[in-house]
Amino acid sequence: MKKIVLALALVILCLSVNAQKMNNDNKKITVIEDRIAIKNLVDTFSVLADVKDVKTQLLLFTENAEVSSVTNGKPGGTLTGRKQIGEAFAGFLNLFDVVYHINGQQTVTLNGNKASGISYCQVVLIGTENNKKMKTTMGVIYHDDYVKENGHWLINKRQSNFTWTEKTEMKP
């Protein structure tokens, strides 16, 4: 009888340890999935900017999102809500013939259904100024706050830090 009780206790212990390990593995998988989803969110934002699809781009933001900018250390304006963000984005992107984002390193801190992140991006804008084809290249650091709504990560707050800008005339 003692052997049966001891064997049963060992089986229960093994099952408990396996359940805890599976729970930890599931948590790790969720963290990895969330990090990949946030990276995809940031990259999708850039791709949609490149093709000037502001309507779809706005769906990457929460309804009452905030976007602010800092240029060379000086604060700019703040846009609030999808409508205001969309109008500003569309107006800006329409100034250029070509828009090209190259996303680089990213760090993300997860906290349940909220997260924060820093992403680096190089933006190239080509347009016409004073009848000259001009290329503007900028280094941008995005400081983002994300929220997970209905199973999808969205940008809730974005501060775009334009840290440097280089403008050159393009030769034909």
Image (cartoon, rainbow, N blue to C red):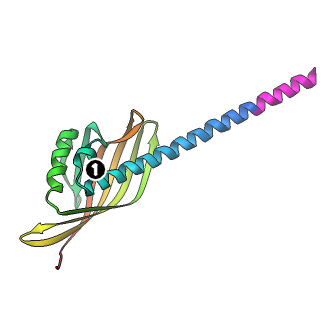
The range drawn in magenta is: 1-14
Quick check: 55 left or right of 25?
left
- Residue 128 drawn above or below residue 61: below
Residue 126, quarter of the rendered image:
bottom left
In the image, 163 versus 46, the foreground residue is 46
Q: Is residue 21 magenta?
A: no
Quadrant showing the N terminus? top right
In the image, 24 versus 95, the foreground residue is 95
Q: Position of residue 160 (x, y in %)?
A: 27, 53
Q: Secondary structure at mark 1?
A: strand
Q: Is residue 9 magenta?
A: yes
Q: Position of residue 112 (x, y in %)?
A: 46, 36
- Residue 136 drawn above or below residue 61: below
Quick check: 100 left or right of 118?
left
- Identified at 40% across, 38% down, the residue is 152
Q: Which residue is mark 1?
A: 159
- Identified at 57% across, 43% down, the residue is 28
- Identified at 68% across, 33% down, the residue is 19
